[in-house]
Structure formats: structure tokens, C-alpha cells
């Protein structure tokens, strides 16, 4: 982080949690002083429309017209991921103000994205926390397994989106083990033939979605009632329930799996 001079010019990412200042459908562009950003702490995090992009350190009391990051999933992926970078770095700085080892204050290091303990005897360096979470689409012949999560269910207990299963990687696990464990815990289904599909940064607040395709092996659906409201097999040519939004790796996994279902029906 450096203190912004009045004439620094570029795009400005001003955030609060996973909300972003995005007036008129873009990040603000211009000199720092035009936006009252002089002397705020900022980091250069990349390029936005061929201009430098700076993320400005979060101030909890800042009042602006915020746009939720989720509403920007429609942007080109590289832009959405850059916004995720800024939001995750701000979350990291906010949650690493003090050293976890000695309790002294921390400051952003000069030459890399890390928080450095200011106690010379300690000098501990913490790096941005990224929490890997698997996300998996399970296929059984011509059907896909989709779940309605409690966090998506409507208050009357009906409706809401149906999507793939997801869950955080635990320490000492391979991604494939997480896939097996999460699918079994949440739906009672055993899977096989687990293949890597792709990934997606997910700044809510600091996940990294690691996507997989898998095939049904055995078992009947048994819901994990603390997390899953409903889970069902949907035939690819049945009417689909409401699905996750465009731009999510969840929807990409679902589309790829429906295509595999279609091929399996030949
Ligand atoms: N980009 C996408 O398409 C999608 C992203 N997701 C994301 O996947 C992530 C994981 O999904 P869930 O089903 O909620 O996870 P999950 O099945 O592991 O359960 C959530 C629980 O995990 C624990 N937890 C929270 N943060 C953790 C962390 N950093 N490390 C380990 N455990 C943690 C908490 O006890 C929490 O209640 C969430 O961030 C969710 O927003 C989920 C579906 C689609
Ligand atoms: Mg889960
Ligand atoms: Zn320390």
C-alpha cells in the first residue's frame, strides 16, 4: 500500500466488503483528487481498459452508492476476477492488522502482497488467505444431481435456485477427497471418475472455487438437513429448475454436464 498523491491517474476500485463503487456501470477513472482519494492507502493491482487499476484500502465508515460484486458477474471474466483480487486483498488487509504470532501491528510489505509484522524481533509475514473450495457436478447417465441449498431457499421453504454441490477443502485433503466427502456428506451419494474442470476466484470473502465433473457410483439421496433443503436428479431434457446466474462456474459445470447427458442418450 502506498499513500496516493493527488495526481495519480487511473481506475479506482473502492470497496466495502464485497460491495464496489461502480457508478454509471464502470469503475471511476481519473486523478485521485477528483474522487477525494488523496492520501488514502492504495495498491496497484493490474490494468483496467489499458489504464492502471488501484484498489483503495477499505474505510468502514465510507458512504457511497455500492454495487454488490455478485451483480458484476456479467462482466468479462478477466475483469470480474480483477475485482475479486481487489476485494480479497482489502479483506486480507482488514483482517491482518495485527500479527498472529506476536500481536504487534502489521503493515503491507513494499515488494509483494503480504502483511509484515512491524516488530523487528518477529518480522512475521502473512500472505493473502485464499480458501480453496471444491464445486462439483455429478452425472448419472442422462441425469444431473442438483441441490437447493438452505441459503438459497425462499422463506416459505419453496423455490430458489438448484445448483451444484460445493464445500471447503479441509487441511490434509486432496481436492478429489474433498469432492468425495462433500458429495457424500450433503447428499449421501458416492461418486467416481472425478475430473478437473476449471476454477474461479470467489471473493465472498476469499474462496477459490475449484471445479470438477464426477459420475454417480452408488447410493440413494440422503439430505444433510443443516445445509441442503432439497436435492434431486434432473434428466437433461426435463424442464430445468431455476439455475445459478451466468458467469458462475456452477452454471458452466451444469451446462457441461447436461451436454454429457445428451451425448449419453444417443
Ligand atoms: N462460484 C460459484 O459458482 C459458487 C460458489 N459457491 C461458494 O462455495 C463456497 C463453499 O460452499 P459451502 O457449501 O458454503 O461450503 P461447505 O459445504 O464447506 O459449508 C460451509 C461451512 O463451512 C465452514 N467454513 C466457512 N468458511 C470456511 C473456510 N474458509 N474454510 C473451511 N470451512 C469454512 C463453515 O462452518 C460454513 O458453515 C462458498 O463460498 C460459496 O459461496 C457455492 C456455489 C456456487
Ligand atoms: Mg456445501
Ligand atoms: Zn509479529
Image (tube, rainbow, N blue to C red):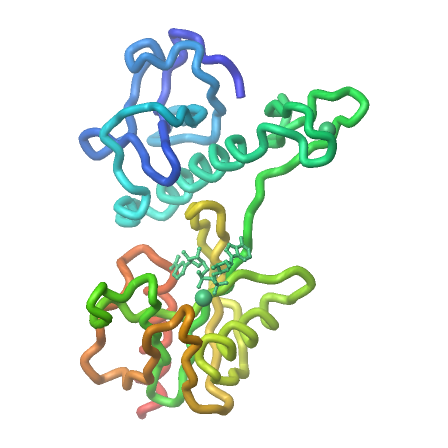
Would residue 76 be found to the left or right of residue 197 on screen?
Answer: left
Seen at 18% across and 80% down, the residue is 239
The spot of residue 123 in percent (x, y) is: 75, 26
Q: Would residue 213 be visible to someone looking at this image?
A: yes
Q: Quadrant of residue 103?
A: top right
Q: Name the foreground residue: 252 vs 171.
A: 171
Q: How many marks?
A: 0
The spot of residue 114 in percent (x, y) is: 62, 31
Q: Quadrant of residue 234?
A: bottom left
Q: Name the foreground residue: 245 vs 199.
A: 245
**Which quadrant would the C terminus be assigned to in this image?**
bottom left
Q: Is residue 231 above or below residue 151?
A: below
Seen at 32% across and 65% down, the residue is 251
Would residue 227 be found to the left or right of residue 35 on screen?
Answer: right
Q: Is residue 241 above or below residue 167?
A: below
Seen at 69% across and 63% down, the residue is 172
Q: Quadrant of residue 124?
A: top right
Would residue 69 be found to the left or right of residue 124 on screen?
Answer: left
Seen at 51% across and 76% down, the residue is 185
The spot of residue 212 in percent (x, y) is: 48, 69
Q: Is residue 48 above or below residue 119?
A: below
Identify the residue at the far top of this view: 6
Q: Would residue 255 be visible to someone looking at this image?
A: no
The spot of residue 211 in percent (x, y) is: 47, 64
Amino acid at each position: 500500500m502506498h499513500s496516493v498523491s493527488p495526481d495519480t491517474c487511473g481506475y479506482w476500485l473502492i470497496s466495502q466488503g464485497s460491495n464496489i463503487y461502480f457508478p454509471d456501470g464502470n469503475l471511476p477513472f481519473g486523478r485521485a483528487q477528483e474522487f477525494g482519494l488523496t492520501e488514502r492507502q492504495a495498491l496497484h493491482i493490474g490494468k483496467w481498459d489499458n489504464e492502471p487499476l488501484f484498489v483503495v484500502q477499505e474505510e468502514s465508515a465510507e458512504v457511497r452508492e455500492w454495487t454488490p460484486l455478485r451483480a458484476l458477474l456479467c462482466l468479462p471474466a478477466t475483469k470480474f476476477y480483477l475485482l475479486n483480487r481487489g476485494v480479497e486483498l482489502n479483506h486480507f488487509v482488514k483482517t491482518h492488522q495485527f500479527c498472529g504470532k506476536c500481536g504487534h501491528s502489521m503493515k503491507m510489505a513494499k515488494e509483494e502482497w503480504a502483511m509484515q509484522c512491524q516488530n523487528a524481533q518477529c518480522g512475521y509475514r502473512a500472505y493473502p488467505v485464499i480458501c480453496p473450495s471444491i464445486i462439483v457436478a455429478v452425472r448419472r447417465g442422462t441425469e444431473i444431481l442438483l441441490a437447493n441449498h438452505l441459503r438459497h431457499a425462499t422463506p416459505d421453504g419453496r423455490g430458489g435456485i438448484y445448483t451444484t454441490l460445493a464445500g471447503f477443502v479441509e487441511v490434509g485433503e486432496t481436492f478429489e477427497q474433498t469432492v468425495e466427502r462433500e458429495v457424500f456428506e450433503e447428499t449421501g451419494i458416492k461418486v467416481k471418475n472425478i475430473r478437473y474442470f476449471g476454477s474461479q476466484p470467489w471473493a465472498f470473502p476469499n474462496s477459490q472455487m475449484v471445479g470438477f465433473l464426477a459420475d454417480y457410483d452408488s447410493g440413494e439421496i440422503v439430505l444433510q438437513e443443516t445445509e441442503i433443503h432439497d436435492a434431486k436428479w434432473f434428466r437433461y431434457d426435463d424442464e430445468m429448475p431455476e439455475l445459478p446466474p451466468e458467469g458462475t462456474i456452477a452454471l458452466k459445470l451444469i451446462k457441461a454436464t447436461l451436454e454429457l447427458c445428451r451425448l449419453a442418450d444417443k
